[in-house]
Amino acid sequence: MDVIVDTSLVLGKFLYYFLESLVYKIIPKTKKNVAGEIVLITGAGSGLGRQLAIRFARLGAILVLWDINQEGNTETCRLAKENGGEKVFPYTCDCSNRQEVYRVADQVRKEVGDVTILINNAGIVTGKFLLDTPDHMVEKSFLVNAISHFWTCKAFLPAMIKANHGHLVCISSIAGVFGINGLSGEYFVSPYYSASKFAAFGFAESLFLELTMAKKTEVKTTIVCPHFINTGMFEGCISKYPFLLPILEQEYVAKKIVNAILEEQVYLMIPKFVYITLILKQIMSPKMLIALSEYLGVDTCMVSFKGRKKANELQTETEGKRQ
């Protein structure tokens, strides 16, 4: 009897939520006001992080900018203020260092206040074969791309839970839902990069479910999985069929992410074609998936000189700290 009752309740909820989603497709959700919200963006010193900072500045948010690159972070701070940001606080922070994350987080709480929107955006990638990459660089990728999310959430989530108010944003990747690598004489998107993005996605999704089960429904979650973005990390990346899987522009992705946060969307895949490929992934055989990948050209990314240079600089910097 319990099985029948429970099944009926689930089917009823499915129908209700399906109709609700249809209504929202016709009538857009009311966008929340983020003026006065304290928005922390990791990896704010360049690329997508900088574009997000500029957009939130225009919306009247209080900005906390984290980046390991002090010069780039200072420039983002200047641009945010030029775009209406009245309160912008840049901090130099290495997100791969747990102790440093907690130390700077304490500083933020004392000097700015409790963060209400946390955007885990910081990420690194290197253009090398897996077997050509030193172990410490693999570890570094996981520390920045995934494990740092644990430290930032542990630092700022308690205040959100106490107030039952906040928003966690995970910038994952299309490489976090598909095993992707890029080939052009050398790997550009290595398996460990894809694995680290899978980890970030899994952490964010599990945390969303945990908060929901704990009835902290006003602590929102948005998980973003874009195709490759035209930033310094992926400069020179080429898509075989841009009309299906284009190389995305930073401004466009930032606009879509901010809109998803304002509408409190849980998942954001960019472009929408990714949703279709996710469905196909579940029903196709591995050989069919390989054939589809070859057709779409998702493995035809090319490493630019600048991209390789950044990877080599990061490796040299990391090796220097180890010595």
Image (tube, grey):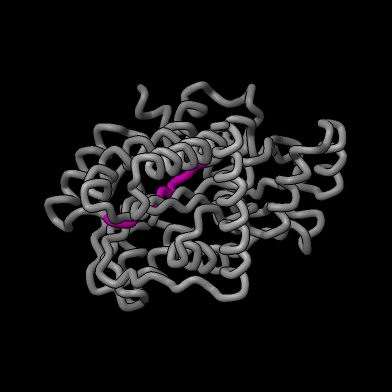
Furthest residue to the left? 110
Residue 318 in the image, given as x and y percentages of width and height = 41, 31
Find out whether residue 179 is within the magenta segment: no
Q: Position of residue 76 (x, y in %)?
A: 36, 64
What's the residue at 63%, 31% (across, down)?
A: 191
| 197 versus 114 height, above or below | above
At 50% from the left edge and 53% from the top edge, which residue is drawn? 266
Image height of 202 relative to 157, above or below: above
Whether residue 31 can be seen here: yes
State the image coordinates of residue 253 (x, y, percent, origin top left). Answer: 55, 63
Residue in the image at 36% along x and 35% along y = 150
**Number of numbered callouts drawn:** 0
- Left or right: where does residue 180 sit relative to residue 291? left
Residue 209 picture quarter: top left
Q: Quadrant of the N terminus?
A: top right
The reply, left or right, for residue 124 in relation to residue 115 is right
Residue drawn at (78%, 64%) of the image: 243
Residue range (magenta)? 116-124
Q: Nearer the viewer, residue 153 or 102?
A: 153
Q: As drawn, is 152 to the left or to the right of 193?
A: left
Q: Quadrant of residue 308?
A: top right
